[in-house]
Amino acid sequence: MHRLLSRLALALALALVATVVAAGASVAADKWVTTYDSKYLPGVVTIRTGERVTWVNDDDLPHDATGNGWATPLLNKGDSYSLRFNRAGTYRYYCSIHPEMRSAVIVLGAGGVPGTDVGAPLGDARRTGGAPIALLVLAATVVGFRVALRFAVRR
């Protein structure tokens, strides 16, 4: 019995490590902005050059993020869209449907200097269908636990 408990503890520890690694790899350089109750949450986000911001719509209403020369597509509930910001500066934006919704992305350059107001982010963009990161981390945990358990039982 002691041996089985030791193996289960090892399996759980390996699953926990797999979860932390999977979560860290998937969100390491991303900041997330959620639209909910016709607000951007959190308000202003600060990133470094080369990092991404992902907007996720958790509201029943459609929203976007429209800046000076750039915009996300219209996002329905569950949709998300990411932009990589490759230039330091302050990127102010608002929702084109609900102009009272306003926020900004501050991109720090070398030495942590934010720069001035700028236009388009000059980066790549990607749209995803809305599987929240929590589900991906949960799936990684389950897979990691099963693999670790098989490893522990075979020993």
Image (tube, rainbow, N blue to C red):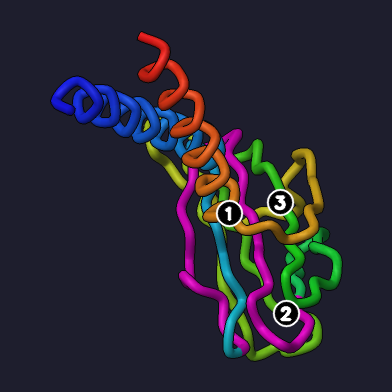
Q: Is residue 99 magenta?
A: no
The residue located at (76%, 51%) in the rendering is 120
Q: Which residue is mark 3?
A: 82
Q: CA distance from mark 3 to mark 1?
A: 18 Å
- Which mark is drawn over residue 135? 1
Q: Which residue is mark 2?
A: 95
Corner quadrant of residue 154: top left
Label 1 amino acid? Answer: Leu
* Residue in front for this viewpoint, 25 or 31: 25
Whichever of callouts 3 and 1 sits on the residue coming sooner in the sequence is: 3
Magenta range is: 38-63
Expressed as whole percent of the image width and height from the top left, the position of residue 66 reads 76, 69
The residue located at (75%, 39%) in the rendering is 123
Q: CA distance from mark 2 to mark 3?
A: 15 Å
- Which mark is drawn over residue 75? none
Does residue 115 appear in this view? no
Circle 1: element type: helix
The residue located at (80%, 46%) in the rendering is 126
Instruction: From this view, report whether residue 79 is shown above or below residue 142.
Output: below
Q: Is residue 56 magenta?
A: yes
Q: CA distance from mark 1 to mark 2?
A: 27 Å
Label 2 amino acid? Answer: Cys
Direction from residue 76 to residue 151 in the image, left or right: left
The residue located at (46%, 70%) in the rendering is 42
Expressed as whole percent of the image width and height from the top left, the position of residue 77 reads 74, 76
Whichever of callouts 1 and 2 sits on the residue coming sooner in the sequence is: 2
Q: In front: mark 2 or mark 3?
A: 3
Circle 2: element type: loop
Expressed as whole percent of the image width and height from the top left, the position of residue 88 reads 57, 42
Label 3 amino acid? Answer: Ser
